[in-house]
Amino acid sequence: MIDIDQLSEAELIDLNHRVVARLKLLSTIRSQSRMVNFRIGELVSFQPDGRPTLIATVVRHNIKSVSVVTTDGQKWTVSPHLLSKVTPAPTEDNKPKQIHHHKHSRK
């Protein structure tokens, strides 16, 4: 363990910068590991605060988020932990498609 009481102001500032950089790296690694569960072109769902669940298609993986386009053309940037996979149900020619939501488990 580091005894911070013995560090100078400059050393504390340096330590702070290193801690923040490490926390950002860990956050990025966590987001990217969740992101690999969603492929470009895959259907997903998510629920923005105060709005109904939206269905969208994954169009891009960003560093810490996923870009999606909803069925009505809205573009969203969403954290991967908020996304769930969507699987279209099998259909017969005369029946409308149903969509099944699969909540992605958080780690």
Image (cartoon, rainbow, N blue to C red):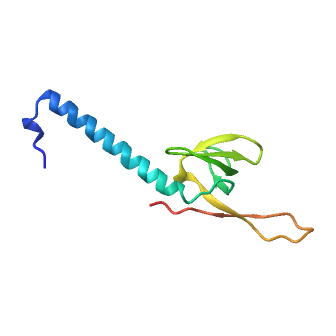
Q: Is residue 22 left or right of residue 99?
A: left
Q: In which quarter of the view is residue 14 placed?
A: top left
The residue furthest left is 6
Identify the residue at image location x=70%, y=45%: 69
Q: Residue at x 65, y 56 (%)?
A: 44
Would you place residue 24 above or below residue 81 in this image?
above
Which of the 4 quarters of the picture holds residue 13? top left
Nearest the camera: 102 or 10?
10
Side of 48 relative to 97 (left or right): left
Q: Position of residue 18 (x, y in %)?
A: 26, 39
The residue drawn where x is 48% and y is 52% is 32
* Labels in figure, total: 0
Q: Position of residue 100 (x, y in %)?
A: 70, 65
Quadrant containing the C terminus is: bottom left
Q: In this view of the protein, which residue sits in the foreground, 95 or 93?
A: 93
Q: Is residue 23 left or right of residue 62?
A: left
57 left or right of 22? right
Residue that lies at the very extreme toward the right in this rendered image: 94
